[in-house]
Amino acid sequence: MADREHPAFPESLRLRASVLAEVRRFFAERGVMEVETPLLRSHTVTDVHLQSFEVRAHDHSPPRLFLQTSPEYAMKRLLAAGSGPIYQIGKAFRAKERSRLHNPEFTILEWYRPGFSLADLMDEVEQLITHLLCRQKIIRYTYGELFRKYLNLDPHSIGLQELQQRCAELIDVSGADLDTTDYLQLLMDQKIEPMLPDRCFVYQYPSAQAALSVVAPDVDGVPVAQRFELYLEGMELANGYFELTDAAEQRARFECDLARRQQLGLPEIPIDEDMLAALEAGLPSCAGAALGFDRLLMVLGESRDIGDVISYPLD
Amino acid sequence: MANYVTNEFKSGLKVLVDGEPCSILENEVVKPGKGQAFNRVKFRNLRNGRVWERTFKSGESVEAADVMEIDMEYLYADGEFWHFMKTDGSFEQVAADASAISDAKDWLKEQDAYQVILWNEAPISVSPPNFVELEVTETDPGLKGDTAQGGTKPATLSSGAVVKVPLFVNIGDVLRVDTRTGEYQNRVSK
């Protein structure tokens, strides 16, 4: 019997099905293998600003498990095991994220390319996007270039105090306990993003925002993070890293996250030793990208809210 | 009063910002991939109507404001205050000062209902309905034959407001006026 309350079958789900098929064809043609990795694991990311869902059995018996915020760590283990180029389209979960552009459960497209440079990967992201959208070339800007052009400041060298002052002149911000990355991010979001063209890449981020990417000197010798962000119609659609393969450096970054988590009173997260072991065993030099698949559908379907492209979004 | 955390923000919420009673007009959560989440909030200051935007780090909280919006009946002015009465049968009265009455001052008619915003039980703003009906107390006599040209003339209403009216309007006519634009709509009765 038909459900009285059931709305008309959403066109957005037909779009989703056809784009999924198209993306799978795109990677199959390039010899990139589709993989699946677990959504439930005993470890999760240490990122200060990512909150995982913790899952337990109904009777609260161990083990304590986490829904994955992205398939990154597991996919890196596959790469270290010799998988070659791989991609995954699956669900990822981030607690406390619901907005016009966020649903706590979302679809992520993530892929890794051994032997690719960051520029090679930007080329491939561009090929995928132009293939799906059939439009023109995507412009590339460095992070530093945008800050110098629109705000006349150098994001790689500016001190916290001066940054705080500049930010206060431009944006009404409550409180003053923000760090350099927070201020840069606010300026990026409120003062630079509105100036960006409909589609562009931003790359070479400040080293403090490296996350899991390699930090290397740019043409002027300034150490910058080898990562990019693809903006589509004002949304962060995809990010890419030239992946850090140095296990010691990776451990130091995890420990830095944990120290910051402790300062902020956030729950302690055990470091994912399996992921570090994979780096120690030898992660091939590679570049990897993660793309918000639901947001891609928003662009293709001209939707304003992520809830419009998901069958049953959380309230 | 209670506090509201950023994840409780929604439009219509009344809060204290810099000690001023404000209403949230819009609240947008901004969260870059791995970065700090922020709330971009658009407020209206309920006292002076000023609209502005402030950004909060997610997890911050603001104090709730004891604000009520209620319909009250206008009674009279005593030269310093404008007196209103609750319509809930309590006959409770409040006195609005010149700054609270400013938006409604030109459109007051005894026994009509106005929306009054009370902050800590004191009126801080009075809004007239979108349309009011007021009597003409003063205007030049209309001249025959001029109506075809659609000319206008000033007319003073019982509330003191001066509006542009068609030439056929006379003293004693009751007019319907849009309080948002101050424009004459039509003649209600003679």
Image (cartoon, coloured by chain):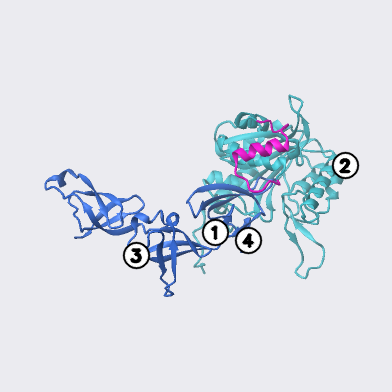
Chain colours: A cyan, B blue
Element at label 3? loop
Query: Pointer 1 and pointer 4: residues touching (CB < 8 Å)?
Result: no
Residue sitting nearer the eye, B34 or A182: A182
Amino acid identity at mark 4: Asn
Amino acid identity at mark 1: Lys
Residue sitting nearer the eye, B136 or B68: B136
> Residue A104's mark?
none
* Image depth: mark 3 or mark 2 in front: 3
Mark 1 vs mark 4: same chain? yes
Mark closest to the chain's N terminus, 1 or 3: 1
Query: Pointer 2 and pointer 1: residues touching (CB < 8 Å)?
Result: no
* Image depth: mark 4 or mark 3 in front: 3
Kindly identify which residue carries mark 2. A280
How far is the residue under mark 2 from the one under mark 4? 49 Å
How far is the residue under mark 1 from the one under mark 4? 11 Å
How far is the residue under mark 1 from the one under mark 3? 26 Å
> Residue B3's mark?
4
Amino acid identity at mark 3: Asp
Could you tell me residue A12's position as x and y percent?
54, 51
Kindly identify which residue carries mark 1. B14
Kindly identify which residue carries mark 3. B112
